[in-house]
Amino acid sequence: MHTLIVVSHPDTASLTHAIARQVATGIQAASMDATVEIADLAAEGFDPRWTHGDIARFTQAAPATPDVAAEQARLDRADALVLVYPVFWWSFPGLLKGWIDRVFTQGWAYEDDNAGGKIVKKLQRLKVHLVANGGADQGTMDRHGYRSAMTTQIDHGIFDFCGAPVLSSNVLLASDDGYPAAHLHTAEAIGRRIAGDMPSTSR
């Protein structure tokens, strides 16, 4: 089974990248059948800006632009998607949000059924795992409802809208015991659990 890990941070020495690598390590350690691809959006130079080409695709006046089509093909090859990102303003960094905006298009991720007035969810096959890391403490998250707000806008607002089940959603905080080393152990455990969610031979 194949997992696509998408990481959004410009510094490859960051904790975000280290977490992504540990998730990959956990997946591969848990399953001899697993393959993993890490997509580094910053290093690859993905352009998050919504363009006229994106508008044309949204209105179904034109096919997806080549860069978006390439990302959709990469997702089509994946059985699971893992997003690893730092929390910026209680959500994704702009680069990752732009990737979602441009790649999860109408006609590919979902379809407006204008006649029936319903949304056709087209990504039921794609299992999603979210791994965020942030600097706020748990008390701040709880007091202001930031965690539930993130769940509403990301887990439900994006992935449930497209039908992609979010099987795990993790927020790793700087206030957690053992930070930052503990986050790397947690990331590997997340990877092992992801491998366990996919039909494969364990070792």
Image (tube, helix red, strand yellow):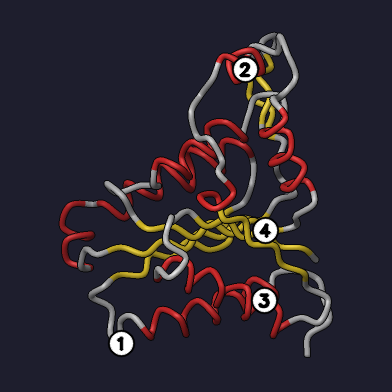
At x 60% / y 20%, what residue is drawn? Answer: 54
Classed neighbour count for the residue bearing mark 1: other residues with Cα under 10 Å, few (<14), some (14–19), many (≥20): few
In the picture shown, does residue 182 fall above or below 129?
below
Tell me the crowding category of disc 2: few under 14, some 14 to 19, or many 20 or more residues within 10 angstroms, Cα based. Answer: some
- Mark 4, Cα crowd under 10 Å, few <14 / some 14-19 / many 20+, is many
Give the SS element for disc 3: helix
Residue picked out by circle 3: 27
Q: From mark 2 to mark 4, how far is it between C-alphas? A: 25 Å
Q: Quadrant of residue 51?
A: top right
Q: What label does residue 53 carry, if any?
A: 2
Q: Which quadrant holds the C terminus? A: bottom right
Mark 4 lies on residue: 4
Q: Earlier in the sequence, mark 2 or mark 1?
A: 2
Could you say which is closer to the camera, residue 61 or residue 121?
61
In this rendering, position of residue 8 left or right of residue 172: right
Q: Which mark is residue 178?
A: 1
Mark-to-mark CA distance, 4 and 3: 11 Å
Q: Residue flagged by tag 1: what amino acid is it?
A: Gly
- The relative height of residue 75 versus residue 47 in the rendered view (above or below) is below
Q: Going from the N terminus, do you reach mark 3 or mark 2 first?
A: 3
Residue 124 pos. (x, y %):
71, 45
How far separated are the C-alphas under marks 1 and 3?
Answer: 22 Å
